Amino acid sequence: MVAGAPKPRSYGVVLASLIVAFMLAAVPLPDWVNAWRPAWVAMVLIYWCIALPERVGVGTAWIVGLFLDGLTGSLLGLHAAGLAIVAYIAASVHQRIRLFPLGQQALLVGVILAVYLSFTLWVRFVQGTSGPNPTMLLPALSSMLLWPWLFIILRDLRRKFRVT
């Protein structure tokens, strides 16, 4: 193996965490809970953009978003563009957000996800498939509340498998 080349398992941990996020995004929920469904894929993507900004960025987000478009059956490119915006914002502030305590990180993640959800709602509105929805930001709120636990789990996995 070439010195300085990424370890093959490092990509495996990132890929496995994204697959788990896709599985959590696909789990059927009752209608009353579905409005609160966290943005699992976006949260995992934010974590990896903060932890490994040189490896996980806008290109990765675009590919992940295309898979999410296929999973949700939405307009092709909707989630790809939204997640690319998320990755750009997360990668832009990765040095600052690393210094924040988990509570402040959760607030920033909530804001980033609110931007993502607003973008997807705007595209659906322009497309004519959705109108203003008072519950559109509930996933950002639930994701914000779950961020500290997701962060700790992914950080421990990254350390255990020495993903650098």
Image: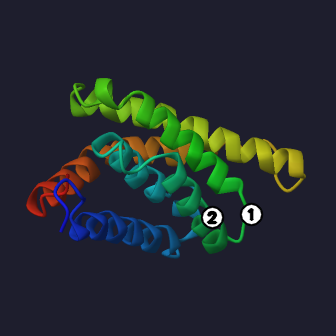
Placement of 129 over or under 119, stated as above or below: below
Q: Left or right: 42 with respect to 156?
A: right
On the rendered structure, is 161 left or right of 103? left
Could you say whether the residue bearing mark 1 is in a helix, strand or loop? loop
At label 2, the amino acid type is: Leu
Task: Name the image quarter holding residue 154.
Answer: bottom left
Q: Residue 142, relative to residue 23: is it above or below?
A: above
Q: Residue at x 43, y 69 (%)?
A: 24
Question: Above or below — where is 101 with respect to 34?
Answer: above
**Does residue 29 appear in the picture of this structure?**
no
Instruction: Name the residue that disc number 1 marks.
Output: 76
Say what amino acid the circle numbered 1 marks.
Leu
145 and 156: which is toward the camera: 156
Residue under pointer 2: 66
Image quadrant where residue 93 sits: top left
Q: Are marks 1 and 2 in contact (CB under 8 Å)?
A: yes
- Which residue is at the front of the view, 10 or 27? 10
Q: Nearer the viewer, residue 34 or 38?
A: 38
At 51% from the left edge and 37% from the top edge, which residue is drawn?
A: 88
Binning the other alpha carbons within 10 Å of mark 1 as few (below 14), some (14 to 19) or many (20 upward) gives some
User: Which residue is at 21% across, 64% downward?
Assistant: 7
Q: Nearer the viewer, residue 49 or 151?
A: 49
**Residue at image x 26%, y 67%?**
13
Number of residues whose C-alpha sits closer than 10 Å to that of mark 2, classed few (under 14), some (14–19) or many (20 or more): many
Please provide percent x and percent y for residue 8.
25, 70
Q: Height in image: 25 above or below 90?
A: below
Q: CA distance from mark 1 to mark 2?
A: 7 Å
